[in-house]
Image (tube, coloured by chain):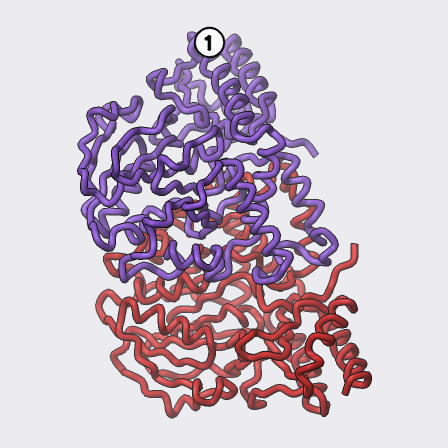
Chain colours: A red, B purple
Amino acid sequence: MSRVYNFSAGPATLPEEVLAQVRDEMMDWQGSGMSVMEMSHRGDAFVSIADAATRDLRELLNVPDDYAVLFLQGGATGQFAGIPLNLCADKAQADYVITGSWGKKAHKEAAKYIKSSVAASTAEQGFQTLPAVADWQLDGDAAYLHYTPNETIEGVEFSDIPDVGDVPLVADMSSNFLSRPVDVSRYGLIYAGAQKNVGPAGVTIVIVRKDLIGNPRADTPMFLDYQQQAEADSMLNTPPCFAWYVAGLTFQWLKRQGGLEGMAEINARKAGKLYDFIDASGFYSNPVEPGCRSRMNVPFLLADDEANKAFLTEAEAAGLTTLKGHRSVGGMRASIYNAMPEAGVDKLIDFMKDFEQRKG
Amino acid sequence: MSRVYNFSAGPATLPEEVLAQVRDEMMDWQGSGMSVMEMSHRGDAFVSIADAATRDLRELLNVPDDYAVLFLQGGATGQFAGIPLNLCADKAQADYVITGSWGKKAHKEAAKYIKSSVAASTAEQGFQTLPAVADWQLDGDAAYLHYTPNETIEGVEFSDIPDVGDVPLVADMSSNFLSRPVDVSRYGLIYAGAQKNVGPAGVTIVIVRKDLIGNPRADTPMFLDYQQQAEADSMLNTPPCFAWYVAGLTFQWLKRQGGLEGMAEINARKAGKLYDFIDASGFYSNPVEPGCRSRMNVPFLLADDEANKAFLTEAEAAGLTTLKGHRSVGGMRASIYNAMPEAGVDKLIDFMKDFEQRKG
């Protein structure tokens, strides 16, 4: 077996230790005689797995007691609808800050249900910067303000939590969830698809202040009803059990890395050395304003677009995969989530150096 | 490792060969250097997995070309909403035939969106029989007629496809999907949560006649929009890739069992011998009218309710697990889906015989 360094933006690389445990427990989870995939979600074995995962996630993020933690289906895209459906029965209006492709999609989907106003957007700047919070056009009476702390495609990331007064702050953290400590109490709702920093695609985590839920719109599909799911411990209907289990193993792995403080340090180091190398290079460039750069997704361009194909082919041959940039941005993108080892980033930089010398 | 015979109603036992392949490919899928969990859903590797699964499913069920095959999130419960959302923009009315707990839930959820009429119900008969199709109160102008070919909890199953004229027939096949050949062309839409006969919970298959979709209600969440998902090969947003992959391995396994004809024969034999034993016994009983009995879910009662606990404990010790009946029915339930080996049913019968001799 020869594992590659996989820079996919998502589904993304997972900790090798997690995968090895999944493999070892595949036919017989801890003497139960069955795979986790085969367990009744109502049985003691799976309930213990689900409870442990929930407890570990609460511990990692220090989630206050007045927040529900849900493991749902539908992806972040599902929550683009789920959020207005759950939070807007009374106030059919919310503010959206658009700093990239995902924020744009979230805003568009919400417009099916509510007046979704644009409080700020960097579309005109090609999403290569972030809007100053002081300039956001906030509606004090909005049901919530939605933003995307990290934009996967454009590689921009907020380093601080914006202060938006009393309006509940809603964050799509899909691509930087659990990559650093976060003060959950500053948020009304945090959500994240699992397939970047947590586990396999198919489970979506929603952390929501309990006083915000329980009054969904009448047309909310039952399985997206946060209150009903909270009351049922996310088992109103059969949950994505296996993905939940893998997420739990990732939470345990994170604790072994020193929790989110430990992880944040490693992530800062990984991103720092990659950006430093790119900035010092005459061949590679990153278009994002330095203070707004993502520590998770690093897009970069080659000086010569003609070299893109050779770069990808040679990187692949060197065991560095899935580096092609999103078509809307072009060039390359290295997603360096929690599970990307620092050695993978080092190897990427070495390869980039060597490629530059040969082609630059 | 000692695998048990797991009679869970779902998530349920999977073919041992499938699990072994999943285990063997966990760290490195076919030389890709990564787990299927880690693959970009847009990459060649995963697209080949998804395409093969779709092709094999089409082949197994002989799905006509004018039907779309979708792999979605949300479970069957998600489709309880998805179906009226997608099929009822013009006609806000549909008929429901209720023959058990799941049909009841489907009907209730649909009522959020449309006038969901009850065309027939066996609630008064305790869901222990099936209503004669001739007596169904059909509305010729309904958007569709929904029924549940197999009710997991009560253990009733239609052996034939009801003839409902021109109204599109919609079937929740979650618990008997792929257990026998089905003439898909008789249906407008078939759907099934994976966690009984297909794979892990978290992927739901929808097979729908293409002319029925493309006109969803305005409040349909994007990820539940069948037309958009069909156009995007179920990848409008990140699909539940890993569950889809496991489903594909199960389809291959089914082909090795002789396809659905082969499987139907095995299933008829498994169910036949279990019902025969129960009927011949003075200690066990099945409350369902013989012609309406499920070949997938076999509920049975012990003559003495006091013996339930001992039955479960001793069965568990014998490697026969998850036999407890649903609380609404009581007693026991043996779910004997495709992946339950005939040897498991034989062992269960032997255990039941022995238990009866000792306690009966």
Q: Nearer the viewer, residue A315 or B12?
A: A315
Circle 1 — which element?
loop
Label 1 CA crowd tier, 10 Å (few <14, some 14–19, many 20+): some
Vertical position of residue A338 compared to residue B63: above or below: below
Residue, far front: B65
Kindly identify the residue that appears in the image at 70 percent across and 75 percent down.
Answer: A309
Residue A96 lies in quadrant = bottom left
Kindly identify the residue that appears in the image at 31 percent across and 35 percent down.
Answer: B147
Expressed as whole percent of the image width and height from the top left, the position of residue A80 reads: 38, 66
Vertical position of residue B212 compared to residue A270: above or below: above
Q: Is residue A324 left or right of residue A344?
A: left
Q: Which residue is mark 1?
A: B360
Expressed as whole percent of the image width and height from the top left, the position of residue A222 reads: 32, 51
Q: Nearer the viewer, residue B222 or B319?
A: B222
**In this figure, what is the number of numbered marks?**
1
Residue A306 lies in quadrant = bottom right
Residue A198 seen: no
Kindly identify the residue that appears in the image at 47 percent across and 50 percent down.
Answer: B71
Kindly identify the residue that appears in the image at 48 percent across and 36 percent down.
Answer: B61
Question: Three-letter amino acid code at disc 1?
Answer: Gly
Q: Is residue A246 left or right of residue A67?
A: right
Expressed as whole percent of the image width and height from the top left, the position of residue A260 reads: 59, 70
Vertical position of residue B191 compared to residue A150: above or below: above
Q: Is residue B236 left or right of residue B132?
A: right
Q: Is residue A225 left or right of residue B7?
A: left
Vertical position of residue A118 compared to residue B345: above or below: below
Residue B10 seen: yes
Q: Nearer the viewer, residue B332 or B247?
A: B247
